Amino acid sequence: MNSYYLINLLIYAAVDAMACLGLSQQFGVAGVTNFGFIIFQAAGGYTAAILALPRDSANGGFQSYLGGLNLPFPIPWIGAAIVGGLIALPFTFLVGRRLRGDFAAVGLLVTAVLMNLLATNYRPLLNGDAGLSLIPQPLQGEYNPQASGYQWVLAAISIVLCGAVYLFVRRITESPYGRSLRAMRDNDTVADSLGKNLLSLRTTMLVTGGAIAGLSGAILVSYITTWSPAAWGYAETVVLFAAVIIGGAGNHRGAILGAILVPVGFEEVTRYIPTSNNLPPNLIPSLQWVAIGLLIVIFLWVRPQGILPERKRVARAVPRPAAPPDGTAPPDQTARPDQAASPDQAAPPDQTEPSAIVVAPATVPLTTTKPRGEAAQPGAEPAPPPHDHEVVLQAVDVVRDFGGLRAVAGVSVSVRRGTLTGLIGPNGAGKSTLLAMLAGTLPVTSGQICYLGRDVTSLPAYRRARLGLIRTFQLAAEFKRLTVMENLLSAVPGNRGDSMRGALAGPRYWRGDENAAIARATALLEQFGLEAHASSYAGELSGGQRRMVEIMRALMAEPRVLLLDEPMAGVHPRLARRIGGELVALAAGGLTVLMVEHELAIMDEFCDPVVAMAEGAVLAQGTMSELRSRSDVVEAYLVG
Amino acid sequence: MTIFLASVGFGLVTSSVLAIAAIGFTLQFGVTDVLNLAYGAVMIAGAFLAYLLNSHGVNVWIALVVAVAACAGGSVLLNAGVYAPFQRRGTAPITMVIVSLGMTLIIEFGVQAIAGGTSVSYAMSNGPTVSAGGFTLTAAQFAVIGLSLLVMAGTHVLLRYTKLGKAMRATAANRTLARNCGIRAGRVIAATWAITGALCGLAGVVFAMDAGSFNATSTDLFLVLILAATFLGGPGQAYGAMLGAVIIGLSTEISAAYITPSYKYVIAFAALLIMLGVRPTGLLGKAA
């Protein structure tokens, strides 16, 4: 084995591993299925080439290309990463909230096919089919690129950069921001309803993945000194996908392993197949592609999690302080005195304290949330009394059509602060649709939604969630591949690590917020009796437990108005009553709850007022006993 | 004017081929819920099967019938052996698309491994050239247009007037509900794979006739046209696919007459991206 062969192997491995890390971040962690990934590597390759190449006449004029800036190393590499990131921006319209993930993936795939076609046929831009060649190698004026020492250094730089990319993506993935990405991957509608800006998250992923791919392309062209459309057919993306799936989507070490096994391994193995004149031409490359296809299908069937599955993240136990750090709040203090001292409704106390009310009587003093609540008391505005029963959420003449079907036909409902409002009605009455429109999950066909005296009709769900309007879902909506603890933590607003910048600043920057959130989540888990399951994947729980995870997660989001869609369905009746009792306590603390529920015993016991809907309209409103006395309500629902 | 008319003529042929392919693709997706990107690979497999027979002296139109039957059977097997097991496991739609990409590589390059990488053509007579209303087309091209019209009429009859077609529409709208109404969804889906597979095989052979010479990867770009026609009309909408095929087929060929032919796919591509970005439910679909 000569050194040339080894260097070749190392550089290809580093380039492929780097590309796979970018794809693993996009696809494995954030669930952005970028079937056009290869375009970004191609763009990086071309950018590095035209930045490094001299004006076209200098190469004898046999190639024509844009640019030719003759810039010194490392500018071409940096430029490649920047361009790789920037060309992601036009694609962001495909990955917003509206388009299904598989349709977006098809759009990206088709883009990759067409870009290759254009680059092949349009010669002036990038020398067409023949591609660019004689691309200058880094610092080739000062050193001899043919020298073995030079090539070793190039290989070493590639590996170091690949290592840097690994640390970069790991830092993102292991941060609260990474948790938000994984939550979006598991269920984007739910992540949206918890205040995650899907468009921003996905755009950031496309841009960072694009920059990584661009850099990998730059390293590759600097080594092989040529770059042509044949090197980046759409199928090359499939190879990278195969590598990430086989290595283990969502596990960055798996991505590196996959890169070594699939693109590198295939090249190396086929090198040893004896060439025979009896074999038809193209047979070996064709069979290589067949084998890649087979590997994808077989792995997705036999071991969809890959060779190195995504690691389970077990939250570190946070030591609970024996007494609050500032000593102002004795452990047995209930939330009530705090409430009086708390600032206006926008500050956390209104939201965190409700859980304190529930938790305080238990053995766990919510000491950990107090510094947070107090830290957010800059203004000394007096808190509104929790029982003013002011209207906080209002639907005005709201209509929703599905094709020809009018699911909600002009509903007006007001929900008052501190109440536990029930919403009942037969199946198909439009209850869940109304809830979805209130939360912003579904746009209204016409009508108006007002929240805290503000028209929020045109606000997307994540913006409403950030204002404290939080919903749960009728169907299972847990983040399956997040642990129960992570499900709860994912909803916490305002974590310093829950942004790209915060994630890159590192754990030291966000550890404090994270510990506070873990302490809150732990207290909540103990209260709901699920502490033993904190480190189980939410997807492995029973139906009733998942419901509770969802309610707890909604509470972690610091809601001011909570919209619950059949929260007790599948929950043991005794537990359902306990949850109901806790909701009442939360309401007493100022939380407002609107709850769809079929279990009328729950309504009887906890909800007042109760709104009855049928066939898309409000039938009546009042206490449960009033509703029972109305013949139309009884006819529509209670009997039928 | 003659260039324009000639390009309209070519456009009609392309639209016809595309309509057959797109109807099959869109019905397959609508009823079975599999966005089967291996559709183009199955097409070319059918085209090569017909070539194999044709090169052994079988008339190309008889070879076409055999290819149609083989693709129908092959698609049923593809579903029963690959897609249905994945679906039964509750695999996410996006993973299904990745599986179908894997199947694309297996089928397409499997064909290439057997057939070699070279381009081939059918030995067939294109028949006398016919001029009608300013268009000059060969008899074979008229036959392709006729076949396409037959397929459209047949699709209309199937969906409107037959029990199977109604069951297909019901299954497409809501599989669980259809099953609860006594429709045997499993059988309907198997029948859909057979019908759409037959359309896929037919599209493959007429595509190969129209293209003149073809190789194993020829349908990669044609799949872009199919996707464009499908999304223009709205995924799952058979009538939308017909409309989309006519628009895409005509616009690509007419644009090819005036700008370089190598860029004729750009219009299809732009149409597809605009539809995805602005109105993913298609021209005939409901507003999002």
Image: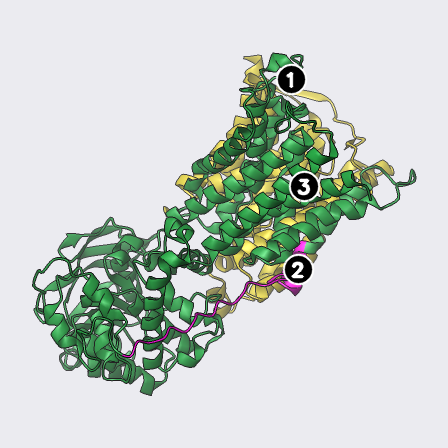
Chain colours: A green, B yellow
Magenta range is: A296-322
Foreground: A558 or A144?
A144
Rendered position, A296 above or below A545: above
- Is residue B179 inside the magenta stretch? no
Disc 1, disc 2: CB below 8 Å?
no
As drawn, the label of residue A549 is: none
> With A58 as the anchor, is B233 left or right in this view?
left
Looking at the image, the residue that sits furthest to the bottom is A574
Q: Which residue is drawn at 29% across and 51% down?
A: A460
Which residue is disc 1 drawn over? A63
Residue type indicated by callout 2: Phe
Residue A333 lies, in percent from the top left, at 17, 80
Give how far across and how far down residue A334 sits, in percent: 17, 79
Q: Are marks 3 and 2 in contact (CB under 8 Å)?
A: no
Horizontal and vertical percent position of residue A623: 14, 78
Say yes or no: labels 1 and 2 on the same chain: yes
The quarter holding residue A324 reads bottom left
Q: Quadrant of residue B17?
A: top right
The amino acid sitting under disc 1 is: Gln
Q: Residue A17 placed where, x, y %?
A: 62, 47
The chain ID associated with circle 1 is: A
Total numbered labels placed on residues in the image: 3
| SS at badge 2 | helix
Q: Residue A11 carries which label?
A: 3
- Please name the residue shown 28% across and 85% down the image: A363
Q: Is residue A223 left or right of residue B250?
A: right
Between tags 3 and 2, which lies in front?
Answer: 3
Circle 2 chain: A
The nearer-to-camera label among 1 and 3 is: 3
Q: Kindly state the secondary structure of the residue where label 1 is placed.
A: loop
Using the image as rendered, state which of residue A424 and residue B90 is in the foreground: B90
